[in-house]
Image (spheres, helix red, strand yellow):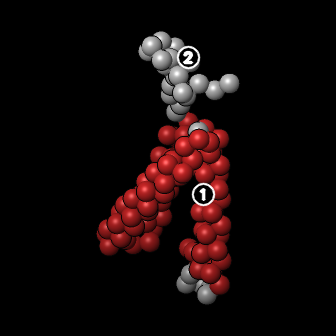
């Protein structure tokens, strides 16, 4: 990551910040499009929930990285970021649970969640 070369160049943190912002925007666009595909009828509620959890996660990451920086400096924060990334890959690789909609009588199919 270009931010690691901050001591050698003043352009490195600027380039790193731009790349980081592009990555965050790409994640948002991908996540929001996936949310809208799953339940288009509940898009605003799901997007609102996504943003709440995104904000909570961002805050938790800031708190964690501040604590790790105090203990281990920049290398520790890089390790923490890599650990979060590996954890996200592991979670993404887990099989998704599928929920079968229930019908009006509690049986399979026919409920409001059924897709044509």
Upstream in the sequence, badge 1 or badge 2?
1
Q: Observer-nearest residue: 71 or 34?
A: 34
Q: Residue at x 44, y 72 (%)?
A: 74
Residue 25 percent location from the top left of the image: 63, 63
* Residue in the picture at 46% in, 51% down: 49
Q: Residue at x 44, y 15 (%)?
A: 106
Task: Say left or right for 26 vs 3.
Answer: right
- Give coordinates of residue 110: x percent, y percent: 56, 18
* Residue most extreme to the right: 116
Give the labeled residue for mark 2. Answer: 109
Q: Is residue 82 above or below residue 8?
A: above
Residue 32 image offset from top left, x and y in percent? 60, 51
- Foreground residue among 62 and 56: 56
Q: Nearer the viewer, residue 11 or 50?
A: 50
Q: Residues within 10 Å of mark 2 (few under 14, many from 20)?
A: some
User: Can residue 2 be seen in the rendering of this structure?
Assistant: no
Seen as rendered, the residue at the extreme front is 104
What label sits on residue 54 in the rendered view?
none
Foreground pick, 57 / 106? 106
Determine which quarter of the picture holds residue 9: bottom right
Give me the residue at 62% from left, 45% from top: 36
- Crowding near the residue tagged with mark 1, few <14, some 14–19, many ≥20 C-alpha atoms within 10 Å: some
Helix, strand or loop at mark 2: loop
Secondary structure beneath label 1: helix
Q: Quadrant of residue 3?
A: bottom right
Say which residue label 1 marks.
Answer: 28
Asked if residue 10 is positioned above or below residue 72 in the image, the reply reads: below
Q: Nearer the viewer, mark 1 or mark 2?
A: 2
Quadrant for the N terminus, please: bottom right
């Amino acid at each position: 990551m270009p931010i690691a070369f901050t001591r050698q160049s003043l352009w490195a943190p600027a380039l790193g910040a731009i790349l980081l912002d592009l990555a965050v925007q790409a994640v948002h666009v991908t996540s929001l499009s996936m949310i809208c595909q799953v339940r288009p009828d509940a898009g605003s509620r799901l997007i609102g929930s996504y943003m709440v959890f995104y904000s909570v996660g961002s805050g938790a990451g800031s708190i964690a990285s501040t604590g790790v920086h105090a203990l281990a400096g920049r290398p520790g924060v890089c390790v923490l970021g890599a650990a979060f990334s590996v954890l996200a890959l592991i979670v993404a690789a887990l099989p998704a649970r599928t929920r079968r909609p229930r019908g009006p009588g509690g049986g399979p199919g026919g409920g409001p969640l059924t897709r044509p």
